[in-house]
Each structure stands twice: as structure tokens, then as C-alpha cells.
Image (tube, grey):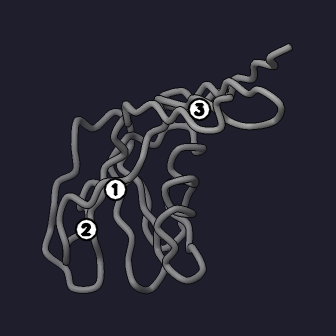
Amino acid sequence: AAREESKSWVRGWQVNFETKNQSICSFGVPQPSLMRENAYCRNRGGIGGNNSYSKNIAGSNLQACADYVKSTPGCGYWFSLGSDGWCDCVPDSEPSCTETSYNGYNVYKLQESSYMNFSGVN
């Protein structure tokens, strides 16, 4: 018999259908998209770890920063990540990122993906 699992995200959703522990379909996972290089969000909710909207991510890991933004209540879809590791999100009360040029930082937006991956189907 097929086993169904679901996993909720703060924004978006993911559903996996599995048969014999092989994933056959997944969709709806928000992924970071580069919106502008060498800039940060001036309207970010925190700076330098002064509150929950800002965290230092070891190695400036984009996926780790995106995961942090997705899991932090109050964070919106927009965030910036610096080469120094600072990951700062724009509050969800703001409609978008107010970009300001700054070397070593990039602006990203979490965007809903819409894909279906049928693999491992017998």
C-alpha cells in the first residue's frame, strides 16, 4: 500500500507521495531566487543579529539562510545574504525589499515552485 506524507512550511507547502519509500511526486516548495547582486534590503527587520530577523549563517550558505527565513515567524519572502554570513529578512508586513547597493551582499526572494517530479514509479 502507498504511504502518504505531508510537510507544512511557514510559506508554501510540500507534499510527497511515496511508494516503497521512493518519492514519486513533490511540489510547492518555496525556493530562493537571486533578485539583485551587490545589494541588501534596507528595510530588513534586523541587523547584525540584534533580533530574530537577523542571523549569522556559517559559510554564507544560501539554502541555510533560506531555511532560516522560512522558519522564522514574521519574516516575509525577501531577504539578503552577505559574504560575511549575515542573513537578514524583510518583515512580512513589508511588500518587498527596498534595495540598496552594497558589495558582498545579494538580495533574494522566496518563490513558490511549481514542479512535479515523477521518479521511481514502477
Query: What residue is drawn where x is 73% and y is 27%?
Result: 18
Q: Secondary structure at mark 2?
A: strand
Query: What residue is drawn where x is 40% and y is 33%?
Result: 115
Whether pointer 1 and pointer 2 mark residues with C-beta atoms closer than 8 Å, the reply is: yes
Q: Position of residue 114 (x, y in %)?
A: 37, 31
| Figure quadrant of residue 64 | bottom right
Query: What residue is drawn where x is 23% and y is 61%?
Result: 42
Mark 3 surroundings: few (<14), some (14-19) or many (≥20) residues within 10 A: few
Quadrant of image for the C terminus = top right
Mark 2 surroundings: few (<14), some (14-19) or many (≥20) residues within 10 A: many
> In screen coordinates, is 68 left or right of 31?
right
Q: Position of residue 28 (x, y in %)?
A: 46, 29
Instruction: Tell me the number on the disc at residue 44.
Output: 1
Mark 3: amino acid: Trp
Instruction: Tell me the number on the disc at residue 73.
Output: none
Which residue of the protein is positioned furthest toward the top in this rendering?
A: 1
Q: Position of residue 109 (x, y in %)?
A: 31, 49
Q: Position of residue 62 (x, y in %)?
A: 46, 67
Front in this rendered view, residue 19 or 59: 19
**First of labels 1, 3 by sequence position:** 3
Mark 1 surroundings: few (<14), some (14-19) or many (≥20) residues within 10 A: many
**Label 2 sits on residue:** 40
Instruction: Tell me the number on the disc at residue 9.
Output: 3
Say which of marks 1 and 3 sits in front: 3
Mark 1: amino acid: Arg
Say which of marks 1 and 2 sits in front: 2
Front in this rendered view, residue 71 or 28: 28
Query: What residue is drawn where x is 21% and y is 85%?
Result: 103
> In screen coordinates, is 29 left or right of 92?
right
Mark 2: amino acid: Tyr
> In screen coordinates, is 63 left or right of 76?
right
Front in this rendered view, residue 67 or 87: 67
